[in-house]
Amino acid sequence: MRLALIGFGNVAQEFARILLEKEKEWAVEYYEGFRVVAVSTRGKGSLVNPEGIDLRRALLDLHEGGSFSPENPERARVSSLDIIGLDFVDAIIETTTLDIAGGQPATDHLRSALSRGKHAITTNKGPIAFAYRDLQALAASVGKAFLFEGTVLDGAPVFNLVRENLPGCRITGFSGILNGTTNYILTRMEEGEGFAAALETAQKYGWAEADPSMDIDGWDAAVKVTALLNVLMGAGITPGDIDRQGIGGITLETVREARSRGQAIRLLCEGALVEGKPVGRVAPVHLPADHSLAKIRGTSSALTLKTDLAGELTVQIREPKIRETAYAVVADLLTVARRKR
Ligand SMILES: NC(=O)c1ccc[n+]([C@@H]2O[C@H](COP(=O)([O-])OP(=O)(O)OC[C@H]3O[C@@H](n4cnc5c(N)ncnc54)[C@H](OP(=O)(O)O)[C@@H]3O)[C@@H](O)[C@H]2O)c1
């Protein structure tokens, strides 16, 4: 399968490293294996080679010079949309920056790939929050895969779990902790650290979004709740429809008071059916300290799915790193390969 990487930041670079590690193993297991034939970025250049990009060189270029070297023979002056249109691209891996206001240009990238009969995989939640129904219908109409496991809970299975392992079940609701940055801040505050200092640490380690208000004001969580509601509960909504409150008003005093009453404050993400209609909410709530979600600490995340036939199931991921998100891309890619086989 010949792949185009649209976006080559943290996730795509880690995916490239995994591909290099596993290429021999997968070439046997999945017959022809996988070959990256094009890479595009916003400002670091693009690479094209129908025989296969030299991924080691691509990674080294970025590591040493911050962009693809002009001497790199694979360097090409082509846009992301041009790359998606190349006839030797079978599937795209879309990992561009999240646009919280409208899910672009990722939605256009995915639409363009699917309408040309190519498989589309993404870790970008924007398109799932703004255009899921359209993209899913398009994928079904052309008989190609549209997969997005990395958009919620990093590499832990959520969408694949429901699709592959809960046949016949309806998801009737969910609750979870879906934003690592705010959870890190809240649990550091439980240990006595101030809000600003905890946020600074989250930024230092690269956990916080480039604009931290996306985390603090609950927008990142609201986009994830929208994605879950759209995919798992058939809602056709966008993030503005979520009842959203961030953690900006939480002080050390509030956290201390909660602790003295045996409670922990968590930014809870919820989806439920209200009069048959899926609705979502993101808000800081006081949970009893022995509640399973109160025990989710630091950058860890968890999601409890409520189902009509299989009871409640909880998926938890402990302090995810970039490898786990890149693994979600791998899981989607191998799903496509298995379907092809
Ligand atoms: N990092 C995580 O742990 C994580 C977890 C789950 C989901 N995600 C999602 O996965 C996606 C990628 O995350 P990341 O951490 O890899 O982000 P990143 O390091 O910022 O990389 C984004 C990449 O997209 C490129 N890009 C932006 N706009 C583009 C365009 N119009 N055409 C082509 N390339 C474009 C950027 O190019 P330049 O480098 O030239 O700017 C960069 O290569 C995001 O949507 C993020 O929300 C990330």
Image (cartoon, helix red, strand yellow):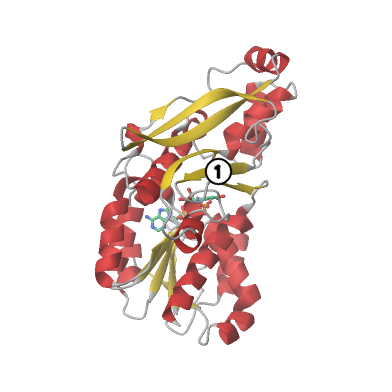
User: Is residue 208 or residue 187 the one in the foreground?
Assistant: 187
The quadrant where residue 59 appears:
bottom right
- Tell me: 104 left or right of 245: left
Image quadrant in which the C terminus is located = bottom left
Can residue 24 be seen here? The reply is yes
Vertical comparison of 68 with 250: above or below: below
Vertical comparison of 37 with 173: above or below: below
- Tell me: 238 left or right of 37: left
User: Is residue 152 or residue 185 the one in the foreground?
Assistant: 152
Q: Amino acid at mark 1?
A: Leu
User: Is residue 308 or residue 74 the one in the foreground?
Assistant: 308
Image coords of residue 247 (percent x, y): 54, 24
Q: Residue at x 29, y 73 (%)?
A: 117
Image coords of residue 263 (percent x, y): 66, 21
Image coords of residue 80 (percent x, y): 35, 63
Image coords of residue 107 (percent x, y): 32, 54
- Tell me: 35 left or right of 77: right
Can residue 68 be seen here? The reply is no
Q: Residue at x 62, y 74 (%)?
A: 20
Q: Residue furthest right?
A: 191
Name the element at disc 1. strand
Q: Which residue is mark 1?
A: 303
Vertical comparison of 115 with 292: above or below: below
Q: Residue at x 28, y 44 (%)?
A: 236
